[in-house]
Amino acid sequence: MEMGGRMALARYVVDAVVLEARGVKEVARTHGVSKTWVSVQLARYREGGYEALAPRSRRPHSRPNRTPVDLEDEIVRLRKDLLDAGFDGGARTIHWHLSKLGSDCPSVSTIWRVLSRRGFITPEPKKRPASSLIRFEAALPNECWQADVTHWQLRSGRDVEILDFIDDHSRLIVATKLLGITKAADVVDTFEEAAERWGYPASVLTDNGAIFNGGPRKGTTVFEALLRELGIVMKHSRPYHPQTCGKIERWHQTLKRYLDKQRPARSMAELQRQVDRFVVAYNEERHHRARGLVTPKAAFDALDKARPGDPVVETHFRVRTDKVDSCGKVTLRHDSKLFHIAIGRRWKGTKIRL
């Protein structure tokens, strides 16, 4: 029964008892309500007249378990500060920061309700069920590293590249280097620096970029050759299927969200410092949901590390036809370096097999 109908019924039964002098029991039986309800309406009428018959709120007068207003304000302040700085501002992250302050820390669900009540939680459209996705994850740290390159711009508008390596199991960022243009030698140098600190992985997963995969050109990159010598398995994603390297792609989204909140860097050195600061926070402070709410560094340190297998001994040859140029030379690219081999001017224009 709607509120208006309920109030009209209350007034009717009151009139039946007060004005018509009918019994409470009779009126209750006639209208299909309880004697107690009729008695309550009579008491309200005698106390405040017809206006007192209006339906009253069922909300309790006090809520002793409600989060204190000052704590709610602290939750909101943390949320804003984290988002303004480019960090994650979810309920779990706020819970971690509150626990570090040493004060009474509400549960994650309570923090979520506070954010929702204050208007910070935006309902999202229904997503594809997680159960429909085919996920893979390395069982041990250093079982697999993912690598990729992403782009960013300096304040001047200059485009630069960021080369990253991430551990598939722990989500630990093992290397990140800012470069003007990433060359094959840069990949090797960055990989070796990361391995010196974290150990060599058992495998590496990349996309099909020219610095990673020499297969499309029927050759071998210097990075692939190095991994074979070390007994490390090299794996490449399917073309046009970035989901295979989803962990490194997700890291790039997180990194760019942080950089968007920072002052535009004037130089590559300044941008590298910004990236390095965030990597420390990501590895050692940010509790990763996919790792059971522990930091990537803690997840990496928790288990024994996978190791490379036996080195692959392989000699690679590529044969091609060429022509001696006007200076009597031919060019050959080896180990990412271009060599000019002198044959002699007398042979210029001569077709050779190289």
Image (cartoon, rainbow, N blue to C red):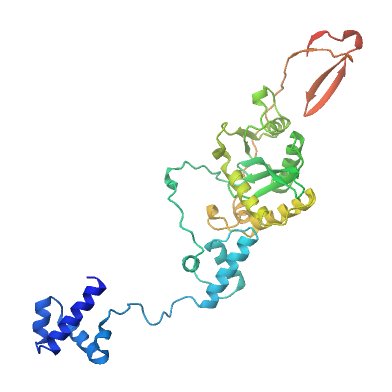
Res 302 visible: yes
Relative to residue 296, is residue 353 depicted above or below? Answer: above
- The correct choice, above or below, for 315 with respect to 271 in the image is above
Q: Is residue 250 left or right of residue 211?
A: left
Residue 304 shows up from this direction: no
x%, y% of residue 277? 71, 56
Provide residue 212's location: percent of width, then percent of height: 68, 33
Q: Quadrant of residue 346?
A: top right
Residue 182 in picture, x, y percent from top left = 74, 38
Instruction: Pick whichever, 329 or 60, lies toward us.
Output: 60
Q: Quadrant of residue 338?
A: top right
Q: Position of residue 7 (x, y in %)?
A: 23, 78
Quarter of the rendering occupied by the C terminus: top right
Q: Is residue 294 above or below residue 214?
A: below
State which quarter of the image contains the N terminus: bottom left
Q: Which one is in front, 161 or 232? A: 161
Q: Nearer the viewer, residue 200 or 318?
A: 318
Q: For the image shown, how many numbered marks are present on the structure?
A: 0
- Going by the image, does 143 lie left or right of 323? left
Residue furthest toward the right?
345
The residue at the point 91 percent across, 11 percent down is 345
Q: Seen in the image, is 314 located left or right of residue 2? A: right
Residue at the location (62% across, 65% down)? 81
Picture quadrant of residue 180: top right
For image coordinates 61% across by 44% down, the residue present is 248
